[in-house]
Amino acid sequence: MMKRKQFTVRLGTASLLSTLLLGSTAALAATGAGTATTNATANSATTAPSAPATVADLMSGASLQVSTVGPTDATFHSQEAPYNTPLVGSNSWHGFLRQSARNITVNLGGYHALNTISIQMEQQGSLGIYFPNQIQFQAYNNGKWYTIGTVHPAVPTTNVVTNVQTFSVNALGITAQKVRIHFPVDVWVFARNVDVQGNPATASSGSIPATLNPVPSQSTAPMLATSTAAHGIHNMLLVYTDGATASQSVWSTSDFLPMVAHQQPNGTLNGKMFDTFLFLPYNSLADTQAGWSGYITNLFTPKQQLAALNAAVGQANQALNTPNRKVKVVLTMPYPKFGDGNWGTINGQEINFSGSVGDPVARGARDAAMSWYLNLLLQDWHSANFANLQLTGIYWDNEQIDYSAPGEVQIVQDAVNDVHQQNLPIFWIPFYDASGLDSWRSFGFDAAWLQPNYVELGTNNTSRLTNAEQLAATYGLGMELEVAAGSITPTAATFYNNTLNQLTQDEFGGGVSHAFYAGSKGLVQAAQSSQPYLRAVYDNTYNFIQNTSVK
């Protein structure tokens, strides 16, 4: 398997968790981990007002509503069902599984001067239960939500001890009828004891300090191909190279030709196909200097890979009378995984991804490896001087932001900075509901495309594609299309053709920036096939790219 590996693993973690009886802290502690209790409080942006004359628990007269930010996924929602315990007045934990983020809205039934807002959460990484990377507290007034404060965990998600933490915010100076607690859900989040403290007497109106900022509105459209963010990428094919099987991992000019231009059964070319090609390694790429350098060497092999694409574009340009056409190329930055041990040496210095006394999360080591790799990659690119290719950006080869991995956010941001220093954009293709999806821009990525992971579910979850469209629109993402998880059977072909039709009907067709996942050479095989159903997969892809009808 090449992509979606992490998605499958994470889903497995959730399935394992759903077989366990999880309730109180004591029950979780019975698994053998210790339990630590901590507190984290953020002051609001108010100017030191005095506390209300009388402070009391406001929850007794309040109503509480939980909502998913973005679409509700039927698979994840069903796995949450055993943990749907009350968030007020119970020692049991309420479980939230993936689906981007949650809003817990408390309607106080009238305007009240506030004192504090809090929620208790638990972390037990061995079961996939993590603190959110941040919790935002908000207040509502006059048709707008305002941010009171943002609280971060007091312990890292890499901490192996079971932790219970109370997250709270100082809300003095705010009079509101409704408050909201917003947090991302990367795998599982367990919460309880939502609490609002303030003056029990109702006020006549709300009051929000001028120092508080409104909550920014979300995007309401996917990434368009004509947008600045897309960097001219309309339709991008994922090209896997350097695998164990030569027939799959070695791309020739004849392989690329029907991907660059639409090739009719008699061999003639009659239109443009993909405008961008993302070259990326298989999952088997060794996380070592030899593995990384070998991958680069393979990319620049004469008459193969990049050189073959360059030749194919030249042939297509001649046939289509487009002499100045260049196709875009995106190259990959491998993911330097913490804990992978000795990577190699740079200038006589050993580089170890497992950390050291002076570099505990191996940030320095991994930064050095990424810089070394990027310099070598770009040096070989410039030396090749391909006449028909242009380098458009670099792809970050991890499909989620794993907050449980030591130094994860810093490593991602360091990679972004390295690429930006080369005056190139950096791109990302997260899996469906991946960690970090809701805040992908904050890491510095210039553009991102969403994997629907629709093919794996098949007809078992027909709402997945619609949900993926909603996520893409919510977070301003492009959309990845999945031809098939393995060989393209007649059933898989029908499924893919129906997907193209649905995307077109839902206005996620020609105007949206797309990436295409077709396994190793799925679309090449379709183009060269004499079987009508398989050939139709290729022709329908062309029609979709050209924004014409899909048969």
Image (cartoon, rainbow, N blue to C red):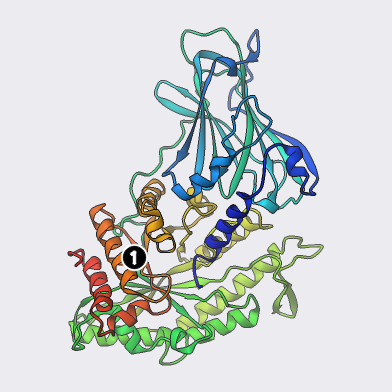
Where 149 falls versus 432 (above or below)? Answer: above
Q: Compared to 310, does 217 lie above or below?
A: above
Report x, y in % for residue 190: 63, 40
Position of the C terminus, as image quadrant, is bottom left
Q: Answer yes or no: is residue 431 visible.
A: yes
Q: Looking at the picture, how far across and down is residue 227, in whole percent?
A: 32, 56
Q: Nearer the viewer, residue 196 or 173?
A: 196
Q: Is residue 298 left or right of residue 324?
A: right
**Position of residue 369 measured from the top left corner of the image (x, y, whole percent):** 64, 72
Residue 364 location, quadrant = bottom right
Give the side of residue 322 with respect to residue 167, left or right. left
Question: Is 235 displayed left or right of 72 in the figure?
Answer: left
| Secondary structure category for the residue under label 1 | loop
Name the residue type under label 1: Ile
Q: Is residue 487 left or right of residue 341?
A: left
Q: Position of residue 265 (x, y in %)?
A: 20, 85
Instruction: Identify the residue at horizontal 28%, vertical 57% (top origin).
Output: 503
Question: Can residue 184 be seen by looking at this rendering?
Answer: no
Name the residue rendered at 77%, 43% in the picture: 29
Q: Is residue 304 above or below residue 93?
A: below
**Residue named by callout 1:** 233
The crowd level at tag 1 (other Cα within 10 Å; few <14, some 14-19, many 20+) is many
Q: In this orientation, which residue lies closer to the viewer: 238 or 229?
A: 238
Count of labels in the image: 1
